[in-house]
Image: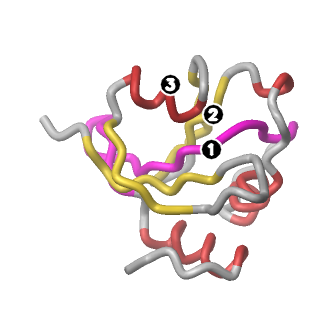
Amino acid sequence: MNTTYNALIVPAHLTQPVRIETVDTVMASLQKLVAGNIESITSRDWHVYLNDEGPRLPQNPRAEVLVREAGVYLDDTLNGTAVFLGNGRRGDESDTPGHLIRLAEQLFDLPLAA
């Protein structure tokens, strides 16, 4: 079973770059990326992992804009590092969908895809 996928990483700190990174999707690795326990927001073909203690972390305006522009309504702000992945078959992980990467490129004026 494959556990490594290409994720879109959106750090909360604006000085850190938005990037695509191959990540191991076992729980311990994801918790390390978000610096704590995980919560997620799920859309049709993607989901984003965040630290479940969000209000104690810096706000992540880039991830918040990306989620909203991708069509997901949010009641609250997003905080901490955001790790976007795709929804695979049978609930498995998959690579971040291309349309979400293209949206991030447009919103943040960044070349992410190779």
Name the secondary structure under disc 3: helix
Residue wearing tag 1: 82
Q: Residues within 10 Å of mark 2 (few under 14, many from 20)?
A: many
Circles 1 and 2: CB distance less than 8 Å? yes
Quadrant containing the C terminus is: bottom left
Provide residue 67's location: percent of width, then percent of height: 69, 55
In terms of sequence position, does the residue under pointer 3 or pointer 1 come before the other?
3
**Left or right: 61 as drawn, with respect to 3:** right
- Determine whether 4 is above or below 101 in the image: above
Q: Residues within 10 Å of mark 1 (few under 14, many from 20)?
A: many
Name the secondary structure under disc 1: strand
Q: Amino acid at mark 1?
A: Ala
- Determine whether 106 is above or below 14 in the image: below
Residue wearing tag 2: 50
> Is residue 88 magenta-colored?
yes
Gap in Å between the C-alphas at discs 3 and 1? 11 Å
Q: Amino acid at mark 2?
A: Leu
In terms of sequence position, does the residue under pointer 1 or pointer 2 come before the other?
2
Residue 31 numbered tag: 3
Q: Nearer the viewer, mark 2 or mark 3?
A: 3
Which corner quadrant of the image does residue 70 belong to? bottom right
Q: Amino acid at mark 3?
A: Gln
Which corner quadrant of the image does residue 4 belong to? top left
Residue 95 vs residue 9, the one in the foreground: 9
